[in-house]
Image (spheres, rainbow, N blue to C red):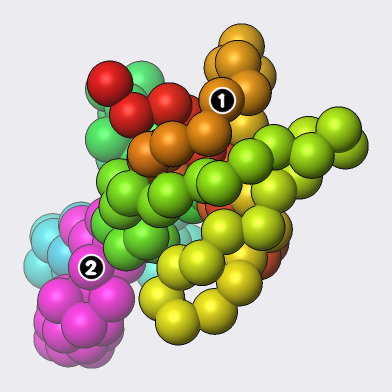
Amino acid sequence: MWIWFGLAFVALIGEIASGTFYLLLVALGLAAGGVAAWFAVDFQWQLVVCAAIALVGLLVLRRTGVLKKREVDATRNADVHLDIGQVVEVESWPDNGVARVWYRGAHWQAELAAGQTRAPGAHVISEMRGTRLILTRKS
């Protein structure tokens, strides 16, 4: 019984270190196995209880959306690229649609976001694709 609870405690420590809910489910399953051992259930049924509780917890968390993958588009996220939202000055737009702008002490390639019209002047960085700045006209 104490081995089950000890393993559950180790899983809880791992959960705190990792910040996911998966090890919490494992810890709950291990604790349930410990409770089954406390009631003197055969070892194979202790394993079944442990696995069942962990799987039921996983299904509940998936159904409620807690474990839903959070997809973040890094190319448009200002938390990932601190350049997003900054203003650059475009002197002119060449025919190929790729301008060179001076930004942070260097020349960068820039193109307009979809639906934008080519016009010189102030533009805002709305996205980054590799080393290319995607710009929208500043209002």
**Image x and y of residue 107, in percent:** 61, 72
Asked if 34 appears above or below 52 in the picture, the reply is below
Q: Quadrant of the C terminus?
A: top left
User: In this orientation, which residue lies closer to the viewer: 122 or 36?
Assistant: 122
Check disc 2 and report the residue beneath it: 19
User: In this orientation, which residue lies closer to the viewer: 83 or 25?
Assistant: 83
Q: Which stretch is magenta?
A: 1-28
**Image x and y of residue 92, in percent:** 63, 41
In this rendering, does residue 105 appear at all?
yes
Upstream in the sequence, badge 2 or badge 1?
2
Q: Residue at x 40, y 52 (%)?
A: 88
Q: Residue at x 43, y 26 (%)?
A: 137
Q: Residue at x 37, y 60 (%)?
A: 83
Amino acid at the residue labelled 1: Ala
27 left or right of 50? left
74 left or right of 131? left
Check disc 1 and report the residue beneath it: 119
**Image x and y of residue 106, in percent:** 54, 79
In the rendered image, residue 92 lying in the magenta stretch gets the answer no
In the rendered image, residue 13 lying in the magenta stretch gets the answer yes
Q: Quadrant of the N terminus?
A: bottom left
